[in-house]
Image: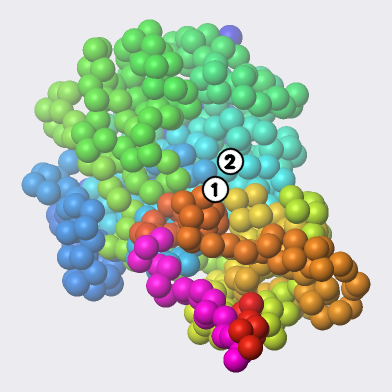
Amino acid sequence: MPQESVMSTPPTSPRAAAVTGLPPARLRPSACRWIAAIPVALTLLGTAAGAVPERGEGVPDATVATFRERNGAVFADWPTPRAVIVVTGELDGYIEPCGCTGKENQKGGLSRRRNFLRAIEAAGWPLVAVDLGGQVRRFGRQTEAKFQSIVDGLRAMGYAGVGFGPADLRLPAEELIAAVAAVGDAPTPFIGGNVGLLGIDAGITPRFRVVEAGGLRIGITTVLGDGAAAQFRNDDVQVVPSARGLADVAAGLARERCDHQVLLAWATPEETRALAAAYPQFDIVATAGGADEPPLEPQSLPGGAMLVELGHKGMFAVAVGLFDAPQQRRAQRVPLDARWGEAADMIEVLANYQRKLETLGFQGLGIVPIRHPSGRRFAGSAACADCHAHAYEIWEGTPHASALATLEEQMPRRDADPECVSCHVVGWAPQRFEPFEGGFAGMQATPHLAHQGCENCHGPAAAHTAVERGDVRASDEERDRLRRELVLSLATPEGRQKAVNNCLECHDLDNSPGFDFDAYWPQVEHGEPAPATTSAGETQKTGTR
């Protein structure tokens, strides 16, 4: 079959050439359809050539020391490599840490990744950045907007090769092509060894690419495993069996006389190992799956290839250093934590994404309220205050009472983002990012449901409050049943577990990694005062009962 899109370009800008001694980026026309080079290099900043990349520009020494102690040092005792291949992937939609419990307590995000890549370039290490794929994990209008924003970020960071995950390929073909296709003279960073948008022969993405870095020729391809291909159906995406697709690509790469070949396999580790065994020319092989965090040291496969695992949610990158001695490689797991600081251009990518969500609004994003399991609707926290004054007063003094304001104060603000709003207002399903019927629908329509309020734990209380106010007639039995439905007690193991589970809906590992119910509960504890009794022995209603 005809050769597909083979590209070669050194990963250095003219400014980088002055530091590394490499020529400016150029294109070698080897059976290549395009006439412009991918900007693999990143702008050099701050750090003198020869330094070890251990921090982002301008990050205070104390911050670097804190996170070196917390998450480990990087590139300790590394000599200067000829080139570095940085492998990322499995972002799963986590474009940026939410920051709800302090961004310093979370890893990941395009902003820190950008500064990490800049630090490598600033140290004078020729860089090739590649990404396994898996930018998103859901579907719908918000996911389409997020995918476009992530791809904008990858382009800005100068990625040389990006693969597809199955969730990426579930997106509508028109959205995929709009995000992925070449822009002007700049070719697409995406590569599809066995995947073709509108068909393999459409040529929207090349089958492989060859770049040069530090005088080394590096071939890159991607493959979607057969198991992953079965996870989606999109009639506008052609996927050929992974082994067959790689056979064509391997033959083309063999003619390119590469020093190193990189295989980015969105497949299970078992599938990836089988592909690596069948095509031993790939000496750096990245796989999907595996543990939540990449191992400290990558595995060595029987043929000598290095198996790179990335973990999930884009919290880590893996840097593979290439050195002068044949077969000499080193790998470094890099936590994308606060030592790298924030990149202004990636924050602007995030801001553009948030502005797009605000423009579309909940309705434009296709968000449709779902029925609450109880079938009931919400009253708002203020409706609880008259009868539950003690609990309401405590709630007013907690961060829960200003939860939505924290999104409004973020830079950029995130109060139009359903994935954030769901844990900062009343009446949403936090893990589904959807409102319940009668839940928060925006500050203009439902200001009384702003912030993290009583009903998110106790349940919708509109029927209960209507009965208690006398707006609706009900029997004593019905009134008491409505009261009992909203009681949440820690006095029994079942009740305690229900309360903990409620908290974990929002205080999960992604957004609140240090959450401990026993430590947090005293900060919001609002148990009922004991009922007072009259001289006649009658119970007198006080506090929240």
Quadrant location of the N terminus? Answer: top right
Q: CA distance from mark 1 to mark 2?
A: 6 Å
Residue at 55% across, 26% down: 192
In the rendered image, which residue does mark 2 sit on?
137
The magenta segment: 517-535
Disc 1 residue crowd, few under 14, some 14–19, many 20+, Cα 10 Å? some
Please provide percent x and percent y for residue 483.
Answer: 71, 67
Q: Earlier in the sequence, mark 1 or mark 2?
A: 1
Q: Please indicate whether residue 283 sits to the left or right of residue 522 in the image.
A: left
Q: Which residue is mark 1?
A: 93
Estimate the x, y position of residue 497 in percent, counting from the top left: 49, 52
Q: Secondary structure at mark 1?
A: loop
Q: 147 or 152: nearer the eye?
A: 147
Please report contact status of discs 1 and 2: CB closer than 8 Å, yes or no: yes
The one nearer the camera, 126 or 455, is: 455
Q: Residue furthest front?
A: 536
The image shows residue 101 at horizontal and vertical percentages of 43, 67
